[in-house]
Image (spheres, coloured by chain):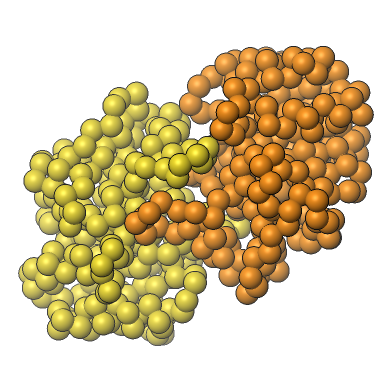
Chain colours: A yellow, B orange
C-alpha cells in the first residue's frame, strides 16, 4: 500500500491545496513512479469539478506528474485501471461516497490500492471514504440516498478536521462528545481524530503519522480516556484495530 | 396542530431542560389540556433514558402534567395513542430516527399530531425528526442503518443549534457552507436555521417564531442571500414551502 490520508486541504498560510504536505508527497510520488494520477472531484459541491481539478493540477505541477479529472474520462473504472494512482478531494462525504458507489469505483479503487499498490492521496472527505464507513464524517447528509460503507483501505474510522475546541457559549455537542456517541453505539471500534495540518500514511504495512504543526493524533476508545500520539510515536498497532 | 420545535435544550444560565421556553410551553399545555405526555428519550446516547426522563419530569413538574418515558411502556404505539402529547429529547438524530421507525412510531406520532392535534414538543434532534427528513442534522451518522425520512410535521428542513460563527483558524466547513451544499443538491427546498434559545411553533396552521435572546431565524434558499427574521416578523409563508 501507498496511502496518504490528509486531515484537510489547506492550513493557514497555504495558497495551494495540500501545500503543507508537499514535502511528504514528493518522496511517495518518486517512490511509486507515478506519472498519471486520476483526480476525483465528486465531493465538490460549491464550485465546479473543473475548477478544483485545475487547483490540484497547480499543486501537483512541481511533481512532474499528470492530473486527470475523472469527470473528463469516458470510462471512470478504466481511468482508475490505467492510472498510476488516485487523488480524492474534500467536500461533502455523502455525495462523494454515493458517486464512488454509483460509478462502480469502490472495487476499482480497492483493487488499484490494495492489490497493485498504486498511490492513494485523499483529504477531508477523501480521507473519510478511505475508512471502513463514513460514520465519522463531520458533513451534513445532504442527499436522500445515504450509503455508509466506503473504501475500507484502513481498518479504523478516522475523524478528519479533528478539533477539541468549541465555540464559546455554543451548546451543541463537541467533537469529542460526537465521537463518544459513536463509541457507545460501536464499542468494539476505535476512532482516530486527525487535526488539520496532519496526515496518516501507510507504506506497505507500515502506518506513520505526520504533522505540519506538531498537533498530535487523538485515539478514542469506548469507556477510555482519549490518548494522544505525537508524530514520532508508534501508531502501527492501529493497523490491527477495527473492523 | 400544536407543535413546538425548539433549537436546543438549555441556554447559558438554565438549570432545567427547556427552561428558556417555560413561558411559551405553559399556555400550550393549558390550551391543549395535556395531562399525560409520552417522553421519547431514544436520542440519548451519553447517559441513560431514565436519567433524561427524570430531568424532563423535573422541568414539567410545574405544569401539572405527567411525563411517562416511552421506554417504560410495554407498547410504544399504544402509549402514543393513549397520551395527550409527545415530547422528544435531543441527542443523536440518526439513532432517534431509526428507533422511531423501528418501533412503528412514525405513523402513530403523525396521526396524533396531524389528525388529533395532540401537543408535540421537540428540541434539537427532536426538532430534526419533525421535519421531512434528517438531511439538515448536525449529528454524526454513528449507526450503520441510516434512515433519512422523518415525521414530516412541518414542510421545510430545520437546522437546529444554528450558528453563524466558527472557531478561529478552523478550516472545516462553516454551518452556512454546509447549508449551501444542501441547497446545491436540493435547489427547490428551503432550510430554516434556528439559533439556540429559539423555537418555531405551529398552532392550527399558524407558524410563529420565538426567541429567548432576540436572535433571528435565518432562511436559506438556493442562490439567494440568506434572510433573517426577528421573532415578531411574519414567517407564515414557510408553511407553503418545501416538500
Residue B222 sits in quarter = bottom right
Q: Is residue A131 above or below residue A112?
A: above
Toward the viewer: B213 or A125?
A: B213
In the shown orientation, is residue A125 left or right of residue B3?
A: left
Quadrant where the image shows the C terminus of chain A: top left
Residue A189 sits in quarter = top left
Q: Measuring 37% from the left and 64% from the top, which residue is drawn there?
A: A90
Residue B243 sits in quarter = bottom right
Q: Measuring 31% from the left and 82% from the top, which residue is drawn there?
A: A68
Q: Residue B190, percent across and down?
A: 69, 62
Q: Measuring 48% from the left and 44% from the top, which residue is drawn there?
A: B140
The mark tally for this picture is 0
Q: Residue A234, percent across and down?
A: 10, 41
In the shown orientation, is residue B209 left or right of residue B15?
A: right
Q: Residue A151, percent across and down?
A: 34, 56
Q: Is residue B90 visible?
A: no
Q: Measuring 43% from the left and 78% from the top, which residue is drawn there?
A: A49
Q: Residue B109, percent across and down?
A: 79, 35
Q: Is residue A35 visible?
A: yes
Q: Is residue A215 above or below residue A129?
A: above
Toward the viewer: A33 or B12?
A: B12
Quadrant where the image shows the N terminus of chain A: bottom left
Toward the viewer: A167 or A44?
A: A167
In the shown orientation, is residue B161 left or right of residue B158?
A: left
Toward the viewer: A135 or B26?
A: B26
Amino acid at each position: 500500500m501507498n496511502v496518504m490520508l490528509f486531515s484537510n486541504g489547506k492550513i493557514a498560510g497555504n495558497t495551494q491545496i495540500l501545500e503543507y504536505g508537499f514535502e511528504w508527497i514528493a518522496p511517495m510520488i518518486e517512490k511509486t513512479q507515478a506519472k498519471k494520477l486520476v483526480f476525483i472531484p465528486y465531493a465538490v459541491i460549491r464550485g465546479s469539478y473543473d475548477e478544483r481539478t485545475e487547483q490540484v493540477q497547480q499543486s501537483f505541477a512541481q511533481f512532474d506528474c499528470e492530473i486527470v479529472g475523472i469527470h473528463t474520462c469516458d470510462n471512470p473504472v478504466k481511468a482508475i485501471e490505467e492510472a498510476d494512482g488516485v487523488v480524492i478531494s474534500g467536500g461533502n462525504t455523502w455525495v462523494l461516497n454515493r458517486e464512488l458507489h454509483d460509478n462502480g469505483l469502490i472495487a476499482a479503487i480497492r483493487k488499484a490500492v490494495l492489490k497493485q499498490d498504486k498511490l492513494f492521496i485523499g483529504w477531508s472527505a477523501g480521507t473519510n471514504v478511505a475508512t471502513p464507513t463514513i460514520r465519522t464524517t463531520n458533513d451534513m447528509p445532504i442527499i436522500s440516498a445515504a450509503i455508509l460503507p466506503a473504501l475500507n483501505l484502513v481498518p479504523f474510522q478516522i475523524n478528519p478536521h479533528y478539533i477539541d475546541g468549541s465555540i464559546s457559549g455554543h451548546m451543541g455537542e463537541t467533537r469529542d462528545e460526537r465521537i463518544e456517541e459513536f463509541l457507545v453505539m460501536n464499542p468494539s471500534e476505535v476512532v482516530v481524530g486527525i487535526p488539520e495540518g496532519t496526515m496518516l500514511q501507510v507504506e506497505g504495512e507500515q502506518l506513520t503519522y505526520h504533522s505540519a504543526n506538531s498537533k498530535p493524533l487523538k485515539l478514542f476508545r469506548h469507556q477510555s480516556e482519549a490518548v494522544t500520539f505525537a508524530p514520532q510515536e508508534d501508531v502501527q498497532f492501529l493497523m490491527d484495530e477495527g473492523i
